[in-house]
Amino acid sequence: MAKSDAEIKEAVRKAAVDGRLSCTAARRLAAELGVSPREIGRAADELRIKIFACELGCF
């Protein structure tokens, strides 16, 4: 079942620590939610959450 934008944003918000989310955590979250890393990145941008330690240049 596809996740709504609100569900994705809530998951990103909960996973972030001090307004930051590691690349590893973002990719893991994408897999858990069944969405693309791009969707996690978009949600993080909208929430002004910084993705750090990017390993693959996905974000």
Image (spheres, rainbow, N blue to C red):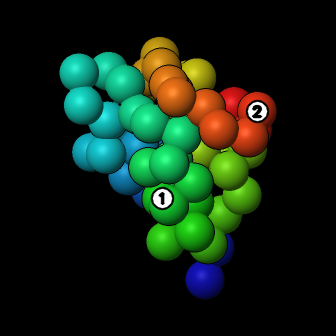
- Residue 4: percent from the left, percent from the top? 56, 59
- Residue 11: percent from the left, percent from the top? 38, 52
Instruction: Kindly tell me whether residue 6 is visible in this rendering.
Output: no
Q: Is residue 39 above or below residue 29?
A: above
**CA–CA distance between discs 1 and 2?**
17 Å
Q: In this orientation, which residue lies closer to the viewer: 3 or 28?
A: 28
User: Mark number for residue 14?
Assistant: none
Q: Residues within 10 Å of mark 1 (few under 14, many from 20)?
A: some
Residue at x 57% of width, y 69% of height = 31
Q: Is residue 47 above or below residue 13?
A: above
Q: Secondary structure at mark 2?
A: loop
Q: Which residue corresponds to mark 2?
A: 57
Residue kind at label 2, given as amino acid type: Gly
Residue at x 32% of width, y 36% of height = 16
- Residue 43: percent from the left, percent from the top? 56, 36
Of marks 1 and 2, the one in the foreground = 2
Q: Secondary structure at mark 1?
A: helix
Q: Which residue corresponds to mark 1?
A: 29
Instruction: Kindly tell me whether residue 59 is visible in this rendering.
Output: yes
- Residue 1: percent from the left, percent from the top? 61, 83
Residue at x 44% of width, y 49% of height = 25
Among numbered discs 1 and 2, the one appearing first in the sequence: 1
Q: Is residue 57 above or below residue 7?
A: above
For the C terminus, which image quadrant? top right
Residue kind at label 1, given as amino acid type: Leu
Q: Residues within 10 Å of mark 2 (few under 14, many from 20)?
A: few
Residue at x 50% of width, y 48% of height = 24
Cβ–Cβ below 8 Å for labels 1 and 2? no
